[in-house]
Amino acid sequence: MDINTLNVRDCFKSMSVSELQQFYKKNSGNEIVLFLNPDMDKNIGTILRTASASFFSKLVILGRKKTNLITAVGMNHYMPIEYVPASVGTHNEFLDIPKIESYLEELSKTHTIVLCEISPDSIPLRKMNSILKGIKPPAFLLGNEKDGIPTELINSSKFNKLIVEIPSPGFVRSFNVSNSFAMIYWEYIRDR
């Protein structure tokens, strides 16, 4: 058995990696996941696996240059991953906000940028699908595990966006980013 097909459903195991890549490409939608300068490879792998379950077109990592995709359990062989170097500083510890704004401005011509963040302008997650119906496909923007989405991007007027918030009536400040994406993903595909 090919190590690259370990996480592939049994009905697809007879296909080669290249056949699986073609199958994925043929069935991909237009949805995108964007992840800002992630700290933890585990979150990248989990988000990639979740998004690939419904044939999201790609995962875009903004900022971070290196990743270890062992936690993707092979899905990195099928779902495209794009790296956009968008960090500055001696150790690339800061996001290049103007570069990210420019990237999102260009992307907003074809996609609805959906920021997943707590903000005065955010809408409850349960209202997201009614707003997304009939408009451009979503590009879900996830923030860094520690810092979330920078205020400069939340307040930017350079690109159109929808800001969604996951209800959390308890006292915890935020959810883990991969858990947040799983909730947003489920809400997005729930009625499809």
Image: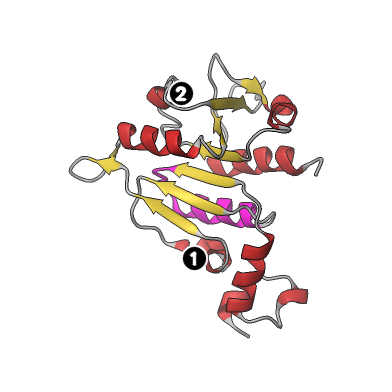
Q: What x and y, as percent, mark residue 67?
A: 40, 58
Q: Quadrant of residue 74?
A: bottom right
- Taking the image as shown, residue 56 lies to the left or right of residue 126, namely left
Q: Is residue 46 left or right of residue 66?
A: right
Spot occupied by residue 65 in the image (x, y as percentages of width and height) = 33, 54
Q: Residue 100 location in percent, x, y?
A: 37, 37
- What is the quadrant of residue 166 in the picture? top right
> What is the count of numbered marks?
2
**In the depicted structure, whether residue 157 falls above or below residue 95:** above
Highlighted range, magenta: 36-52
- The nearer-to-camera label among 2 and 1 is 2
Q: What type is the residue that disc 2 sits on?
A: Ile
In this picture the colour scheme is secondary structure
Q: In the rendered structure, does residue 69 fall within the stretch colored magenta?
A: no
Tell me, for residue 154, which label it has, or none: 2
Q: Circle 1 sits on which residue? A: 70
Mark 2 neighbour class, 10 Å CA radius: few under 14, some 14 to 19, many 20 or more: some
Vertical arrangement, residue 188 with respect to residue 45, above or below: above
Between 25 and 175, which is closer to the camera in this rendering?
Answer: 25
Q: Is residue 44 magenta?
A: yes
Secondary structure at badge 2 equals: helix
Which quarter of the figure has residue 158? top left
The picture places residue 112, in percent across and down from the top left corner, at 58, 34
Q: Secondary structure at mark 1?
A: helix
- The reply to whether discs 2 and 1 touch (Cβ–Cβ < 8 Å) is no
Q: Main secondary structure of the magenta part?
A: helix
Out of 51 and 156, give the one closest to the viewer.
156
